[in-house]
Image: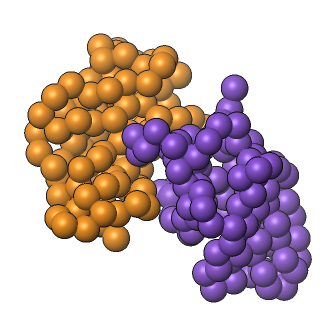
Chain colours: A purple, B orange
Amino acid sequence: SQQGEEDPQALSIQEGENATMNCSYKTSINNLQWYRQNSGRGLVHLILIRSNEREKHSGRLRVTLDTSKKSSSLLITASRAADTASYFCATALSSNTGKLIFGQGTTLQVKP
Amino acid sequence: SAVISQKPSRDICQRGTSLTIQCQVDSQVTMMFWYRQQPGQSLTLIATANQGSEATYESGFVIDKFPISRPNLTFSTLTVSNLSPEDSSIYLCSVEGWTGDRFQETQYFGPGTRLLVL
């Protein structure tokens, strides 16, 4: 079964609104990373949050991590049409092998 | 962050043939990985490319189908052998770990190679 599961699978909002995506996982992790992918191109790294951290910010992005619930969320505030993309969470396991296990992703559409 | 390039960026191949994908990093890194992304799907790890030794494959992936080389700390190749239409995917390499004397925890990805098998 998947380590990471994301919801919603698809999200459509208006420009200026906030978008929240959630990620759940099953086993202990070393860190959790969020990525963006535009139209099947390469992955752009957004934020890394360590297992001992609860919240991180980067510009309009806010990531939270709740290890007791094995879940994370990505909030994009004041969304723009350029934020339209697929967003993936990826967990690095506590064994620290470097391997990432990806969630199924959330497809975000921001309408102008 | 490391700068990663992949060649080719895309290719169309006939079934039964093979394609070798190159991944080049602008600095030495300890860990390199290969992922596959099937159409409309998420990424799945194929293997960890080990420098100077055989790659470590994930369940469902075998060396005969996906031979990997890593001759040094900046370069790796993935070959997809005996191609079938089911191999049509995006293949991505990624890097993480020690870069010189600095540990890079974030995993960075190359731009991907889009493969279509006819």
Image-based side of A32 in relation to B118, left or right: right
* Residue B100 drawn above or below residue B20: below
Seen from the viewer's position, the closer of residues B3 and A100 is A100
Query: Percent from the top left, x then y, of residue B115?
Result: 43, 37
Query: Percent from the top left, x then y, of residue B91?
Result: 42, 40
Q: Residue drawn at (65%, 37%), measured in percent from left and top?
A: A27
Q: Residue drawn at (68%, 32%), measured in percent from left and top?
A: A2
- Quadrant where the N terminus of chain A lies? top right
Can the viewer see residue A83? Answer: no
Can the viewer see residue A2? Answer: yes
Q: Residue drawn at (87%, 64%), measured in percent from left and top?
A: A12
Seen from the viewer's position, the closer of residues A53 and A88 is A53
> Toward which corner of the image does residue B29 lie, by quadrant?
bottom left
- Quadrant where the C terminus of chain A lies? bottom right
Seen from the viewer's position, the closer of residues A77 and A10 is A77
Query: Percent from the top left, x then y, of residue B57?
Result: 37, 24
Seen from the viewer's position, the closer of residues B7 and B105 is B105
Q: Residue drawn at (61%, 81%), measured in percent from left and top?
A: A58
